[in-house]
Image (spheres, grey):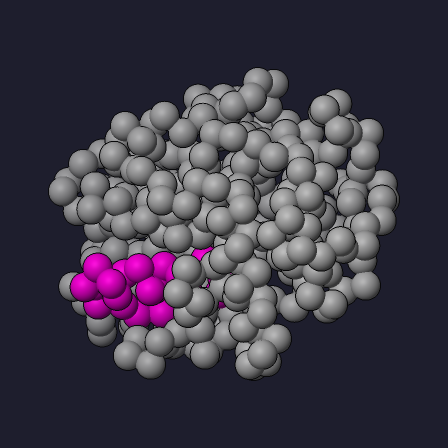
Amino acid sequence: MGVLVTGGAGYIGSHMVLSLLEAGEEVVVLDNLSTGFRWAVPDQVKIVVGDVGDAEVVCSLLKRHAIDAIMHFAGSVVVPDSVKHPLAYYLNNTCNSRSLIQCAVKEGVRHFIFSSTAAVYGAPPAIPVSEDAPLKPISPYGSSKLMTEMILRDVALAHGLNYAALRYFNVAGADPRRRSGQSTPRATHLIKVALQTATGQRPYLEVFGTDYPTADGTCVRDYIHVTDLTGAHLAALNHLRKGAESLVLNCGYGRGFSVLEVIEAVKKVTGIDLAVRFGARRAGDPVALVADNHRIAHALNWIPRYDDLETIIGHAHAWELRILKHRLTD
């Protein structure tokens, strides 16, 4: 049996492929390469270039490779972009996911792990936020992901599919062995952008909003190392394969850092005093998002290995230097 990784040539998906290979799994990647990179997929892994919304391609792939589990990472992820282009996000994140889930049911795939987001909570009234908090997304990105969670819930009841919806907080870092990392040149994630500034790829880092009701006026986020996140996915897969019940779980460390605190940590790790400019708030950005992670620790016995902001930044910095040296852009 095999595992299909959609978006497996992208940032998180490529790390997932590495973790699955290390666990001895047979892996197939489906990616349209719109934001992913063919070089990010190891040579021994079969990659199919195509869209998750193409039912004919997906159903054929599932049948041909005897897939028993799908890990679904493919999607659009930029919150402000979703505010500007909501229809594109509902197409890519919701409609295409529905098509993928339909193919899974048709071909008898039993296990489905979904890349969801803390954006489903919107602007939560209490921090840290638990899985039982009200679901009130404030961006089309969050809404598009929540709709897919709802589809999975209903399909699980109707067809016996068991699933895990993992609600990511802010994913950062890179493979400690520098085999993969965040490589999109126009990325919007804070740590990536800060490191691009520190390494001379951007002239300055813009901070969006300094008037939030936080200690220093900037947004607060919970940063999780990408390798710890893939570890959570492996634990979820093992859980589902044992016939256990479906899960909805937060993926975060339970501790938040402000934008300015992250910038100071980047300066410390790199030794570079990067240029910073201050701008207005962005649409769709909540004040703070910090995970209550007690449920994932209990349900999956998940124990993070890289729960340290400077370690996360250090691994991301090492990857950024590798990109610059080898020009990994194709």
Which residue occupies the extreme top position in the image? 126
Q: Which quadrant of the view contains residue 199?
A: bottom right
User: Which is nearer the eye, 308 or 122?
Assistant: 308
Is 309 included in the stretch rendered in magenta? Answer: no
Residue stretch rendered in magenta on the structure: 10-30
Q: Position of residue 38 (x, y in %)?
A: 46, 78
Q: Position of residue 80 (x, y in %)?
A: 71, 48
Left or right of 56, for residue 291: right
Q: Position of residue 277 (x, y in %)?
A: 85, 49
Which residue occupies the extreme left position in the image? 242
Q: Is residue 9 above or below residue 294?
A: below
Q: Position of residue 76 (x, y in %)?
A: 57, 56
Q: Is residue 285 visible?
A: no
Classify the position of the N terminus by image quarter: bottom left
Residue at figure coordinates x 76%, y 53% from the top left: 273
Q: Which quadrant of the view contains residue 163?
A: top left
Q: Is residue 83 visible?
A: yes
Q: Is residue 17 above or below residue 161?
A: below
Left or right of 317, for residue 104: left
Residue at figure coordinates x 58%, y 79% from the top left: 325
Q: Is residue 81 above or below residue 146?
A: below
User: Which is nearer the eye, 281 or 111?
Assistant: 281
